[in-house]
Amino acid sequence: MIPFNKDEKPKELVPEGNHVAILYSIVEIGNVPDTYPGNEGQFVHQIRLTWELPDETREFDGEQKPMVIGRDFTVSLGDKSNLKPFVEGMLGGLSDEDKEFFSFENLKGKPCMLQVIHKKSKKTGNPYAFAASCAQVPKKLEVPKQFNESVYLDYREEWNDSVYATLPQFIKDKMADSQEMKSRSGFAENMDDAENVLGDIGR
């Protein structure tokens, strides 16, 4: 048995409250097994959005960098979806026409006010920071320049092995369970007929 390092400090959580945030990373997780009770055997199409918080900087690798926080969403802009209010918060609204022709790339670099709360994991009991809601930045509030390089990755049109290699391991692990990643070798030929791609989110 490998002992834990008792001197290791726990990871600092993003503080609770409302934060100026910039969306810098958009990654398609893909169609993964649905873990919701009663949905066994079904799949849910997910995407991960990650924001940097320019007013919450910490020292990472000897350099002051903004803290970041991400959240996984089901790819849907339906009225009951969790994703829709976040998209509306960043864009300032969303018409039926916007939903029909929506592209996630339009969200890259978008600022917002992100509300962060702390929750406890049902599995481990450990606390974690959770992006709870999103709203527009007040007009008179100046948003700092984005620090992190923008990341956009989807299986259909914007796949890039170099970008994939830079992703945190826990995101790669999630992607590994997706139907898209498991069929990656023949993905290019099959993608035109695939269902639930990023363009089909207005449900």
Image (cartoon, helix red, strand yellow):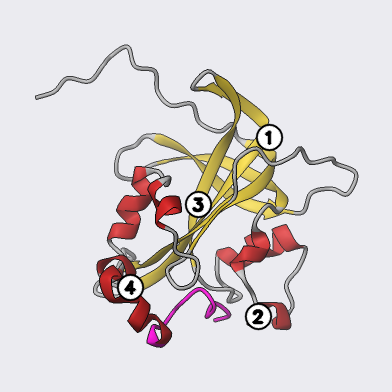
Mark 3 or 1: the one toward you: 1
What residue is disc 2 on? 101
Query: In 3D space, how far apart are the residues under numbered discs 3 and 4 (Cα atoms)?
Result: 18 Å
Q: Which residues are magenta?
A: 193-203
Secondary element at image label 2: loop
Query: Is the C terminus in the top left, top right, bottom left or bottom right quadrant?
Result: bottom right
Q: Is residue 189 left or right of residue 102?
A: left
What residue is disc 1 on? 54
- Tell me, yes or no, whether the two marked residues, 2 and 4, touch with CB atoms within 8 Å: no
Q: Does residue 197 show up magenta in the picture?
A: yes
Mark 4 or 1: the one toward you: 1
> Which of the numbered marks, if any, corresponds to residue 71?
3
Secondary element at image label 1: strand
Query: In 3D space, how far apart are the residues under numbered discs 3 and 1 (Cα atoms)?
Result: 18 Å
Vertical relation: 7 (above or below) 99: above
Answer whether residue 85 is visible to the viewer in this image. Answer: no
Q: Amino acid at mark 3?
A: Arg
Residue at image coords 44%, 79%: 196
> Which of the numbered marks, if any, corresponds to residue 43?
4
Q: Is residue 54 left or right of residue 200?
A: right
Q: Amino acid at mark 4?
A: Phe
